[in-house]
Amino acid sequence: MIAMIRCIARCRGIRPLIAAKYSTVSAAQQRALALEKFDQIPQIHPLLLERAEVMKKEFASVESKMSSGDFDQDLTIKFSNLSIILENYAKYTSEMATFQELKEFILEPDQDPELLQDAMEEVETTVPQLLRSINTLQSRLLPPMKYDDKPAILELRPGVGGSEASLFTGDLMQMYINFANFMKWRYTIVSKSEGNAGFLNEVIMSIDDPGSYNILRHESGVHRVQRIPSTESKGRIHTSTAAVVVLPKMSDGTESSLKDDERQFAPGEVRIDTMRAGGKGGQHVNTTDSAVRLVHIPTGVTVQQQDERSQPKNKAKAFSILRARLAALERDKEFNEQRKMRTDQVTTTDRSDKIRTYNYPQNRVTDHRCGFSLHDLTGCMAGSRLMDVIEKVEEHEFESRLQDLIADSKAAAAAAAAASAVEVATTTD
Amino acid sequence: MPRISPSLARKAIAKSSLLPRLLRANRTLEAAEQELRWIQQELPQQQWKNAVLRRSRLEPLQYILKSQPFGPLDIICRSGVLIPRWETEEWTYKVANALAKLGKEKQLNIVDACTGTGCIPLLLTHELYEQEGIPVDVVAFDVSDEAFKLASENLNEYSNIYKSGKYITIKQADLFSNDLVKELGVRKESDLVTSNPPYIPHEDYISSVSCNGTSRSVRIYEPSLALIGENEFYGALLEQLVIPTNSKGFIFELGYTYQANYVRDKLRNMESWKIGTSMDGAGRIRCVVGWQKGSEMEILEEVCDEVLD
């Protein structure tokens, strides 16, 4: 069909008369075609548009605040965030307006065929543009996830599969290092521990760029690998796993951030254990042991750090990780509560589920949440193609969040209706 | 000391040929690996073997690496001077946090006796002046020639980074000297006297850790001058410094409850003093603290876990 229109359009340039003749013949057909195209344009949910209007008002107030000299970092960040969204919104409204005009024009009966042709051509170019701006606007309009502007802490641990799982954990660490380099993010290895025979037990990395959490949080979960391990002598394919936990980084984990971190907790909320040998301590012994263990009593979350020679440094790192873990817990709780409101057809995103498979023999990476397969495992492990996978997961998450939002508002509306019905019933009694 | 089992030694040698020797000083593989990592991080490769050899003879790692972190500071360490302990670091922080609440208006005059590496005055100045902007004037002294030199070196290093180094003076003086106050040149009024004097009685110095004594590494390598001491030091600190300089408060590190009681008894007939004790992170008695009632040093009560009567 599209090819036909294109063909007609080309003909018009060379032999306008014939083209005109053709077009008059198929005018009805063309209309039908155009209508089909119009149907492709998705409606932005009214809830989201409402949000955009609210943001417009907010933007005005922020702007007036800024012009009156009230100037701080939070405000500027807010300002730039809002202005990006509103820019998208303005683009969307203007494109939508031209599109509406076109639509009305085409649907009008008894149009001049030449003009109709032009209009059809314009539809060709506007529709993809409009689709794109609708997509970007929608993703921006969804309420932001908590901590999405934070840097990230990544914790990698081997799962089932013994030494092969450890090797894969090392490969994953390398993948994230490559990815950080590819994204031009600064990163540091906070701690790395090896078990017997030099196999990796745990790696904690910190990615220090703000906003990296929002991208990397999709990496949380169990990663599965299928390959012939280097430790395998008979050439059998093994399946093993590694667990990745991504946390929002709440503080720098340096001595200067320590005081602030400690202030976040009530006295007695965190028990600080230093692992010291027995005896009298003080001048009697000159230990080098500087390990610190923190136990968050209300939740039982435990963090241990020992890599630094300085005890306060270990303490600072431990506090930073503790805060990140607690923040992640809180975020998950909130997220689950939001999801719980919608009891029907919830797809679980349980931590214990495997989220991704790395199949070496087939050179394939499959993400099980969105069902997307990337047939370039080497590119993914080298960091350059990982973003492709993450983008697909993001899209998938966006879809489900949008569904949640719509379902929530429907439920709220239904509840309100029910409440008013009850009211009516009681008054009639 | 338990023997290192052959299986542990085999495990160690599988990881690195340098590890088995470190086991002699560490006993567990994890601790040995940790020390090896630090050695490899801080020393050039040609010194690793020698460092491991020295450590296997129980020489403190701090002497081999020539430093010990003390708060955010790196304190130079050298044979002949006591290595700063984490307990000292801990209480120094507590004191600094308490004093930080006094505000920037008034200058704090502090005297530190038996300063050793100079770690206490350096950390206090860093926390009070660099972090909080509280003006300080600190005089620190030690009787030992080596300690005096090392403390001066540490002060020099510190002054290269922080301007507040000029508020610290290091002197060589004997706590038991007849005109100590004159030798130090301190003003009549001081706010705080701090000290980590030698406090290990001789019988504990010669016994092993399992009998509440000292570890072999301490006995072999650290100066006994900085370790062996009894109540006479606390008596001298009070009579030679606290009372003559009319100090409003003091904090002394200690290792035994009877030492705190001795300090309390000394000041018993002086109505204006309040005495408390403070514990370390491992729950052992670590400091005796005193302050004059009604003075701003009452803030030191925050440092205490128990106030004696």
Image: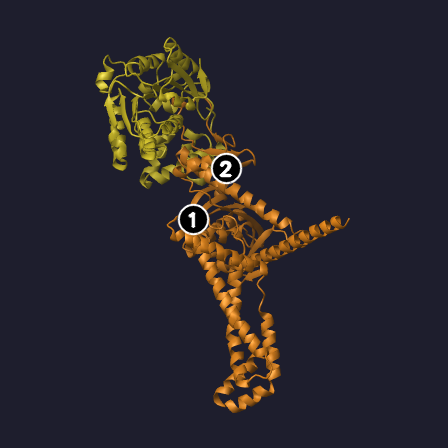
Chain colours: A orange, B yellow
Describe residue A308's horizontal placement relative to residue A361 as left or right. left
Image: A377 above or below B213: below
Picture disc at residue A138: none
Picture disc at residue A74: 1
**Residue B206 is at least partly visible in this image:** no
Label 2 vs label 1: CA separation?
A: 31 Å
Residue B97, horizontal then vertical, whole percent:
39, 29
Camera-nearest residue between A355 and B146: A355
Provide the residue designation for mark 2.
A303
The image quarter containing residue B225 is: top left
Q: Dot 2 lies on which element?
A: strand
Rendered residue at 45%/59% (across/down): A84
Camera-nearest residue between A40 and A171: A40
Describe residue B41's horizontal placement relative to residue A347 as left or right. left
Q: Quadrant of the N terminus of chain A?
A: bottom right
Circle 2 residues within 10 Å: few <14, some 14–19, many ≥20 = some
Chain under callout 1: A
Residue B46, horizontal then vertical, whole percent:
31, 40
Image: A342 above or below B205: below
Image: A418 above or below A18: above
Residue B301, horizontal then vertical, whole percent:
42, 21
